[in-house]
Image (tube, rainbow, N blue to C red):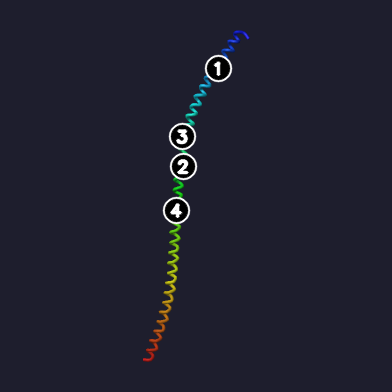
Amino acid sequence: MTGDELDRAIEFLLQQQSKLSVDIENLKDSQAETSRKIDALTSKLDSLASTVDTLASTVDQLSNIVADGFIRTETQIESGWADTREAIGNLIIANESTRDLAQKVATLSLQTSQRVTNLEAKL
């Protein structure tokens, strides 16, 4: 290898070293930017996780409120049905009593009419 070739080889190695140093510096800058972005995303993810936890808690509370409302409504409906069944039963009893009373009144009316007729016939 001649002196000129050696100079060119040294020049080439120095250029490659310089280029490599610049590339490494660029990679360091890029890595630092990536780290900043990851930190920002981590912060946003933590905030989102907190929001999801709050939302889940709120949904859980609302579910309990709705379930309690359904239970109270069901209890009120059952109570209303019991009251309605009792009222219908009382109405049936009253209707039967009225029918029986009407029949007794008709019988008494007929008997009274027959007695009046017999008394008029005797007079």
Q: Earlier in the sequence, mark 4 or mark 1?
A: 1
Q: Are marks 2 and 3 in contact (CB under 8 Å)?
A: no
Residue linked to disc 2: 53
Check disc 4 and report the residue beneath it: 68
Crowd rating for badge 4 (residues with CA inside 10 Å; few <14, some 14–19, many 20+): few
Where is residue 83, by image quadrant?
bottom left
Label 2 to label 4: alpha-carbon separation: 23 Å
Whether residues under marks 3 and 4 lie with C-beta atoms below 8 angstroms apart, the answer is no
Which image quarter: residue 70? bottom left
Label 3 SS: helix
Residues at marks 3 and 1 touching, judged by CB atoms closer than 8 Å: no
Image location of residue 65, percent across then percent down:
44, 51
Give me the C-alpha separation between circle 2 and circle 3.
15 Å
Q: Say which label, 2 or 4, has the lower sequence index.
A: 2
> What amino acid type is highlighted by mark number 2?
Asp
Circle 3 Cα neighbour tier, 10 Å, few/some/many (<14 / 14–19 / ≥20): few
Please tell me whether mark 4 sits on a helix, a strand or a loop. helix
